[in-house]
């Protein structure tokens, strides 16, 4: 956990490893209208922290960019 020991929290979420199944945009918010921050190619590992209302929230890539992708775009790795 990258922030453990540096940030005080009552608990930390253990990310679930997922794989991007289709070309997807990583977005700043859970909406098609939110700005895209990265393009995710099939096979990219997405570390899932939450999945609600059709949007998966987590991080991806070597830079660990945080954002949202459509839930149906990711599946267990």
Image (spheres, helix red, strand yellow):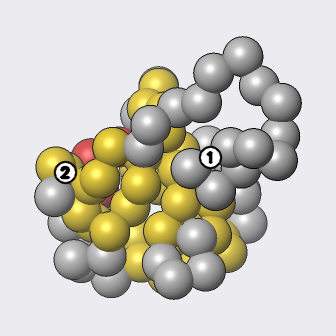
* Residue 75 numbered mark, or none: 2
Q: Residues within 10 Å of mark 1 (few under 14, many from 20)?
A: some
Relative side of 7 to 41, left or right = right
The residue lying toward the viewer, choosing from 6 and 13, is 6
Label 2 vs 1, first from the N-terminus:
1
Q: Is residue 67 visible?
A: no
Q: Is residue 62 above or below residue 36?
A: below
* Residue 31 numbered mark, or none: 1
Position of residue 61 measured from the top left corner of the image (x, y, whole percent): 48, 78
Instruction: Report the Cα–Cα distance between label 2 and label 1.
Output: 20 Å
The residue lying toward the viewer, choosing from 29 and 11, is 11
The residue lying toward the viewer, choosing from 4 and 76, is 4
Quadrant hosting residue 4? top right
The residue lying toward the viewer, choosing from 35 and 48, is 48
Relative side of 53 to 3, left or right = left
Position of residue 44 measured from the top left corner of the image (x, y, whole percent): 31, 76
At 16% from the left and 58% from the top, the residue drawn is 77
Q: Is residue 12 visible?
A: yes
Query: Given the current orientation, which residue lies at the most extreme front position?
Result: 5
- Say what secondary structure mark 1 lies in: loop
At 77% from the left and 25% from the top, the residue drawn is 9
């Amino acid at each position: 956990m990258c922030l453990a020991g540096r940030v005080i929290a009552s608990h930390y979420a253990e990310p679930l490893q997922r794989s991007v199944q289709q070309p997807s945009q990583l977005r700043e918010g859970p909406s098609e209208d939110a700005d895209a921050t990265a393009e995710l190619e099939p096979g990219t590992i997405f570390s899932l922290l939450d999945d609600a209302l059709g949007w998966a929230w987590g991080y991806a890539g070597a830079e660990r960019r945080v954002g949202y992708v459509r839930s149906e775009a990711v599946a267990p790795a």
